[in-house]
Image (cartoon, helix red, strand yellow):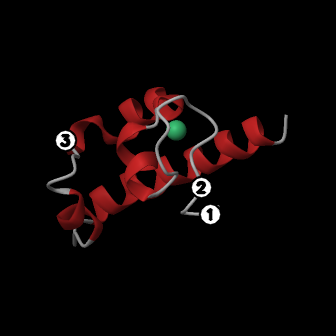
Amino acid sequence: MNSQSICTLCNRNENEDLIHLLLYCPIYGPIREHYLSELNINENNINELLITKSKYHLNKLYFYITELLKLRSFIVNE
Ligand SMILES: [Zn+2]
């Protein structure tokens, strides 16, 4: 994953960085909804979330990223 490259999975023409993956890429919409909807994550609180001491929130984030990478490699390898 190169943080300087444009996300090729969607058409938003944004860099494929953490913010894009966590918040914006529509490809991951369903799993984002599933894991992150109750966290109310946005660009303003994302820093707090990433340093949260809540194991519950960290696990949500962990599962989201795990599922995201699985889906991503599935799509990219097609
Ligand atoms: Zn994208």
Given residues 64 and 41, the one toward you in this image is 41
Closer to the chain start, of discs 2 and 3, is 2
Which kind of residue does numbered mark 2 sit on? Ser
Residue drawn at x 74%, y 35% as measured from the top left:
75
Circle 2 Cα neighbour tier, 10 Å, few/some/many (<14 / 14–19 / ≥20): few
In the image, 40 versus 56, the foreground residue is: 40
Using the numbered discs, state the Cα–Cα distance from disc 2 to disc 3 in whole angstroms: 27 Å
Which is closer to the viewer, label 1 or label 3? 1
Q: Which mark is residue 5?
A: 2
Q: Is residue 74 left or right of residue 67?
A: right
Relative to 8, say whether 64 is above or below: below
Q: Counting residues from the N terminus, which is met first, the one under dot 1 or under dot 3?
A: 1
Q: Would you identify the image quadrant in which residue 48 lies?
A: bottom left
Q: Type of residue at label 1?
A: Asn
Q: In the picture, which quadrant includes the N terminus? A: bottom right
Tell whether 77 sits left or right of 50. right
SS for callout 2: loop
Q: Position of residue 78 (x, y in %)?
A: 85, 34
- Residues packed near mark 1 inside 10 Å, few (<14), some (14 to 19) or many (20 plus): few
Residue 77 image point, x, y percent:
83, 41
Circle 3 — which element?
loop
The residue that appears at 66% across and 43% down in the rendered structure is: 72
Say whether marks 2 and 1 touch (CB < 8 Å): yes
- Spatial CA distance of label 2 from label 1 is 6 Å
Residue 2 image label: 1
Q: Residue at x 66, y 39 (%)?
A: 71
Q: Secondary structure beneath disc 1?
A: loop
